[in-house]
Amino acid sequence: MSEDGLPSAIGRYRPVGIVGSGAIGTVYRAHDPLIDRFVAIKVIRGEVLNAEVRDEYLKRFRIEAQAAGRCAHANIVAIFDFADEESHPFIVMELVQGRPFSQILRDSALRAETDCLGVIRQTLQALAYAHEQRITHRDIKPANVIVTSEGQAKVTDFGIARVEQGSQTQLGEMLGTPNYMAPEQVNGGAVDHRADLFASACILYQILNGRAPFAGRNMTETIAKLLDQAPLDLSDMENGPNAAYVPVIRRGLAKKAADRFPNAESFLEALDAVGDVKPTQPEDHTLVLNSVSSFASQESRFAPDELRALETDLARYTGPIARLKVKQAAQVATSLSELHALLSTALSRPEEVTAFLKAHPADPASLHGGTAHAGGTAGTGAASLHEDGHGHHTHSGAGSLTGISRSLSVIPVTPQLQEAAVESLVRLVGPIAKLLVSQASKDAPDARTFVDRLTAQIKRPEDAAEFKRRLTAKISAL
């Protein structure tokens, strides 16, 4: 490792800079000396993953290499090489100089100078080709579309793609990003290429209206909207300047896959049929969900100094990406407790999560003196949760949970633990509890992260505190 934090080599490639980084991996800009070209290399940090999680990430890496490697298309990021190394598996791909479409949609100036409809058309062209190769992406969203300065769109991140071997679809697995997931992805039904078309329609809606169509204040609300059988209310669009696009949106966002466009080509034809009607740009004030604006201009429920302090602390573990993580979390969190819980999910090492939440508790009420009740006071006979001075939790009080011998940060997320979580969560959110638990368990390095992710989905602070107490008690008994 060099002084600037770059590995001296990855295979034959020579890293020269960092394109981006996260808790699990890093993307490097590197030089290929044999062909004399610059490439991007996505590397997994194998040392931060336990055996079970590592196997899942390697599986996704292989899928990404196989899926994108089969797609030689101008609007799909090309895959050049894949190495399944024991310590640091990596993918070598085309180096694309551009911005994520998500960043463009959040910035009014960038949005005004970008042919956003051209981007969605190119995305559909890429999907038409991928679907011909029997590949379903399953995570189409603005962040996975890179736009160059020349306006060329490149679809990337095939990490959860479905490479079909026959005509069958896949059942029972919830993968994707909730704001852009089709209902069948959320409820574990059959998923095929029409899920990608639903996601594309979500992006088209966002281009026209400034927000994702089913976005809620948290994952619970988003999933509830997706599972509601009623079609999306488009009355505002029907009476607005973008009315010509309503038929396209309505069919693209049909809750039943059979009612959507049968393929990407027909979706493109419907867009072309609208003709030269130029969409009106959405007002900036509609760009609320996941907006990334400066602290100075952000009308946030959190004090700017508070957010800067969180950014500084988080940057110790994640580096420069901390600023983006804090801004995104501040847009969707409804309380300081939820904000801390959301930020803790950006960390992968158990000791990092423990240290961060010790400094910034995900649930201050439960960490400092008792379970909150509707009236805002601690119940006389209620169990309370305290830090023991070593990052572990112990309980005291009548009917107490004294004797938790292990910190949640060293307990893996097992199927038994997930069952316990569903039992505790179902009374608060209803039937979607199982789906929320499935989503929260993905890539969760330990039980503490898993519990905090679920706690962040509960709107009422007193309910969140009680849920956390109950689930912690169940975990201690497992």
Image (cartoon, helix red, strand yellow):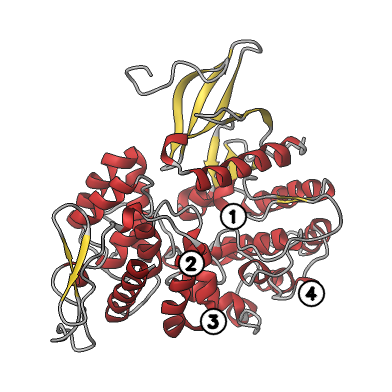
Q: Which residue is mark 2?
A: 416
384 vs 57, nearest the viewer:
384
Q: Which residue is mark 1?
A: 141
Which amino acid lies under the numbered mark 1 shown in the image of this protein? Answer: Lys
Q: Which residue is mark 3?
A: 431
Give the side of residue 297 with respect to residue 137, left or right: left
| Contact check, label 3 and label 2, Cβ < 8 Å | no
- Alpha carbons under labels 1 and 4: distance apart: 21 Å
Which amino acid lies under the numbered mark 4 shown in the image of this protein? Answer: Asp
Q: Which residue is mark 4?
A: 259
The quarter of the picture where residue 297 lies is bottom left
Q: How would you rate the neighbour count of disc 2 (Cα within 10 Å): few for under 14, some for 14-19, many for 20 or more?
A: few
Q: Identify which residue is drawn at 15% across, 78% down.
A: 397
Q: Is residue 79 above or below residue 256?
A: above
Can you give x and y, in whole percent of width and height, for residue 22 in the image? 43, 41
Q: Identify which residue is drawn at 76% across, 58% down.
A: 193
Can you give x and y, in whole percent of width and height, for residue 324 in the image? 37, 48
Which amino acid lies under the numbered mark 3 shown in the image of this protein? Answer: Pro
Q: Depth-wise, is mark 2 or mark 1 nearer the camera?
A: 2
- Alpha carbons under labels 4 and 2: distance apart: 38 Å
Q: How would you rate the neighbour count of disc 3 (Cα within 10 Å): few for under 14, some for 14-19, many for 20 or more?
A: few
Q: Is residue 216 visible?
A: no
Q: How would you rate the neighbour count of disc 1 (Cα within 10 Å): few for under 14, some for 14-19, many for 20 or more?
A: many
Which image quarter holds the N terminus? top left
